[in-house]
Image: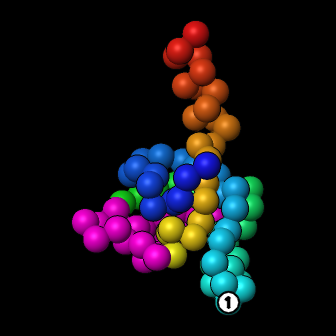
Amino acid sequence: MLPLSFARTGEEVMVSKISGSDQMKQHLCDLGFVIGSRVNIISQSGNGNMIVNLKGSRLAITDQMAAKVFVVLSETKKAVEMEVFK
């Protein structure tokens, strides 16, 4: 599990935990960041801000917001990586 801010452009990840204040958690939930949702990283700027695809919508989020969303690699990517290393 790692912060969304550590994910790389082109990766698909799955939300596994949301941290922060209750207000921040609610804001992220309102944007669609809920446990189990899949997020595609579209681009990242040099300052850590990101554009992601979440539930069919593109969202721009700050690096502070991305640091509060913890993710794991999506199941499909895990399966592919496991096949490669067999």
Residue 81 appears in view: yes
Residue under circle 1? Answer: 23
Q: Residue at x 74, y 56 (%)?
A: 36
Closest to the observer, 69 or 32: 69
Q: In the image, what residue occupies the spot 61% across and 32% down?
A: 78
Q: How is the image coloured?
A: rainbow
Rendering coords of residue 72 (x, y %): 62, 47
Provide the secondary structure element on which disc 1 rests. Answer: helix
Q: Is residue 53 magenta?
A: yes
Report whether 46 appears left or right of 2: left
Residue drawn 51% across and 68% down? 67
Tag 1: Cα neighbours inside 10 Å, few (<14), some, or many (≥20)? few
Residue stretch in magenta: 44-64
The residue closer to the viewer here, 76 or 66, is: 66
28 in relation to 80, above or below: below
Instruction: Give the amino acid at mark 1.
Output: Gln
Residue at left offset 63%, top offset 43%: 74
Quarter of the image containing the C terminus? top right
- Relative to 30, residue 78 above or below: above
Apparent side of residue 55 relative to residue 84 in the rendered image (left or right): right
